[in-house]
Image: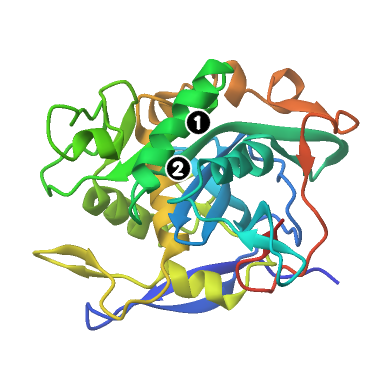
Amino acid sequence: MQQAYMLPYMENEDGEDRHVLRLPNNNSPKWIEPLVPEHVRALIATVDVQQNMFIVQIVGISPGRPFDLTVVDRFSIRNSDREDEHSGGFEWVKPGSYIDDWDKLEELVMARSYRLANDLSKKMTIKMTFCDSGGKAGVTTNAYNFVREIRKRGLAGRFHLVKGASQPSAPRTQITYPDNSKRGGGAKAGAQGDIPVLMLNPTLLKDALDNRLEVKVPGSGFLHFPNWLADWFFGELTAETRDPKKGWLNLNKRRNEAWDLLYYALGACASALLGVEKVDWENPPLWLAPVEGNPLVIAAEREEAFIEAPTIDFAKFGRELA
């Protein structure tokens, strides 16, 4: 039985409410597990750092005017490597407290790969991971120190910190080198001018993302969503409303990770780091080339260096990885 592909439809007749109706879209490919659809040329990861978890979204990039984005996977990393003496399991990660917990991003995100939907003998690896650099006290310091550590191992080009700009007039995307070392709190925050941070204008990028939700033609800035995504995902995607003066607001304090992580992905693609907006799809860079010549595609047998997506209950909210 062929499963219908679902597209979120935004209904906001009064200009304030945004909610989801799930409608079939017969122009889209059908898949019901984390596989890389045939139209995807590259994968990037976006990460939201919370008090006791990392929330991760894997997004595919496809040719188009403008380029399409595809949600390939969504999961949470909750368990650290620290044994819990009381439960016999493992303690939750605490990104603001333990620098070692950040190693989970290298292990379970940066080193991740996904099988191709049209050729299960091949996998696609992650081009780059973009991670939020703010949040609970201690997160920024550990984030900067994690980048310093992976830089020593030659991995800095595969991981980049991001942050939402606070000024409405900020550039849509801008690479900055925060340096507060000469101020009282600078040394504690770890901002010493040596770590690049991709600053994103949330209002501009969320406006663009909201417009993409209305696109119904693949190859025209379309957003592709797999069947296994449950209703909670689309609830997160519509948690915020647009205020003409204040920008996008989460008035009811609902979970909005899907929305934030997608705007990170859009900003990453628009930035100088990836430059997807300027790609000539007739002559793309190798990492956006078709499968046959794409260096991000490897043989599925090469599992020693990459992590295969496990079989899980995809309807469960925020599926967890150990």
* Tally of marks: 2
**At label 1, which amino acid type do we have?**
Phe
Residue to which mark 2 is pinned: 131
| Tags 1 and 2 touching, CB below 8 Å | yes
Residue to which mark 1 is pinned: 159
- For label 2, the crowd category at 10 Å Cα-Cα, with few meaning under 14, some 14 to 19 and many 20 or more, is many
Indicate which disc, 1 or 2, sits on the residue closer to the N terminus.
Answer: 2
| Residue drawn at 86 percent across, 33 percent down | 300
| Residue drawn at 75 percent across, 64 percent down | 89
Q: Is residue 55 visible?
A: yes
In the picture provided, is 241 more to the left or to the right than 35? Answer: left
In the picture provided, is 236 more to the left or to the right than 322? Answer: left
> Which of the two residues, 224 or 150, is positioned nearer the viewer here?
150
State which quadrant residue 161 falls in: top left
| Residue 180, position as x, y percentages in the image | 18, 31
- SS at mark 2? strand
- SS at mark 1? strand
